[in-house]
Image: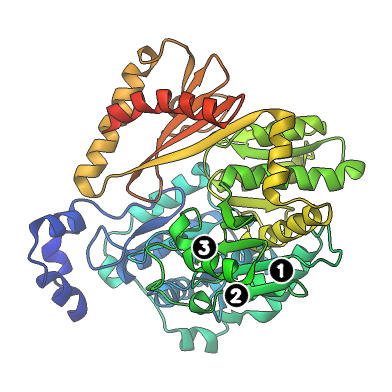
Amino acid sequence: MNGYEYWLTFDEETRKELEAITDKAELDDRFYKELEFGTGGLRGIMGAGANRMNKYTVAKATKGLADYLCKNFSGEKSVAIAYDSRNNSRAFAETAAGVLCAAGIKVYFFETLMPTPVLSFAVRYHGCTAGIVITASHNPKEYNGYKVYDENGCQLVPKYADRVIECVNAVDDIKNIPSISLAEAEKSDMLVYIGEETLGAFLEQVKKLSLYDEPSDLKIVYTPLHGTGNIPVRRILEGRNVSVVREQELPDGDFSTVRSPNPEEKDALTLALAQARRECADIVIGTDPDCDRVGVGVRCGDEYVLLTGNQTGALLMDFILKFKKDSLPENAAVVKTIVTSGLGAAIAEKYGVKTVQTLTGFKYIGEKICDWERSGENTFLFGYEESYGYLAGTHARDKDAVSASMLIAEMAAYHKSVGKTLVDALNDIYAEFGYYYDCLETFVLKGKEGAEKIKAAMSYLRENGAEMFSDLEKLADYSKGIDGLPKENVLRFDFADGSWAAVRPSGTEPKLKMYFSVKGSGREQAQERKLSIGAKLSEIIR
């Protein structure tokens, strides 16, 4: 029982919100399904209803997590909780804390907003059994989310998430989930507030990743996009010439200066780029609300070029291996996802470093770190994905825009010391390894109808994709669990000339994503090749 009439029996605020809705399609969307607890947790539009992020769906997810922890872990159990600058993030975090403490699970609660990678670090630092962060990352302001981390500070991978999902789905009376107040929990030592000391320990670990700290006149404009990066990123860049975008410095859950707080999108960096032009800054750095993704702009004459996630990843790969080449362990390895450009792998090969591929999602990169620590099979150096997420070192088990911002600043300073910009450095890489044109196209398909279109498009491509291209070498269907990887709803088209395209539904947004990677003699030739591949795929999706 989880429909409209049932929800009208909840608190007065919930009832009033639902009764005020006159649009039948809106009500249908709120109740045609329950907001699903997937492998990454919850993410959805905030509001009343079964298919929305609210205190009840958060409480249900937390009760399921508590039941899972009690079934699978003995002794004292504890969970670290962090939250970002989004509307309701603190309230949802408090809801989760109250449910956990009522279940006899101790909570380490960040007293102020904190980046996702700091939560990942905090889980191991405080010896917790799990972690929760309330964030919707780079989604628009209407969204919020709930991500769960295991005892290693790694997002739950399917084999563990499936067990948690079972426990969450078993919670039926979401109206009466046991909870206690934070004041009561603190009084009984079930809740401990954490913050500055934990952040300081995190930053000390990040500083150990430094590769180039020579004095530099490099000018940086930084924007936290109203999110959690403001204090940690500025502290890690202390001593460098950093100018902050004041209009985007402070937390703002409405993200009032941007359409969407996503550093992957050019318009999110409009204010930062304007400030950079005024100040003749060398680079722009922008981090998303939970500070796990970072976007980069580079001055080229009077203009600024925005790097893609693939380009920044390749530059970081080159920078890290160049500075570590004389101390690389024999079993050094880097990790990328199956939809990330092959350029970074080509750079790694030059240095004799193995590249391992995972499915999309940084949780799989974090899983590799944990597996290799136990087995000693490989030594992790660097992991990245095309969606602007990077991790050097093992202080966190998720993408980290704090350490990435430090390394990007050092990398830009190093190249400036030899008279080059990051774009010059990228062109040098292309000259050595060939031109890689990598891009992403996204189809936004909202609501129930959109979900059905996404499902239909994937089914059609799965059944007919092999006949769509005369030069197709292989159609890889990762839903069958190939290459030793878990099953995932991804299709990858590999062509005879080394180009590839991949299609997958987003796991966190109502989107169908189409990835392209074309290696060619130059940009123009590569773009033409991409257009010829993309036209056929887009026609089916549209």
Q: Residues within 10 Å of mark 1 (few under 14, many from 20)?
A: many
**Does the rendering let one see residue 69?**
yes
- Give the mark toward the camera: 3 or 2: 2
Q: Identify the residue position indicated by label 3 in the image.
A: 288
State the residue position of label 1: 202
- Image side of residue 7 versus residue 472, left or right: left
Residue 231 to residue 117: above or below: below
For the residue carrying disc 2, how many other residues have a C-alpha within 10 Å: few (<14), some (14-19), or many (20+)?
some
| Image height of 536 relative to 381, above or below | above
Percent x, y for residue 212? 83, 58
Q: CA distance from mark 3 to mark 2?
A: 14 Å
> Dot 1: what SS?
helix
Which SS class for mark 3?
loop
Q: Which residue is mark 2?
A: 244
Tell me the amino acid under the disc marked 3.
Answer: Asp
Mark toward the viewer: 1 or 2: 2
Q: Amino acid at mark 2?
A: Val
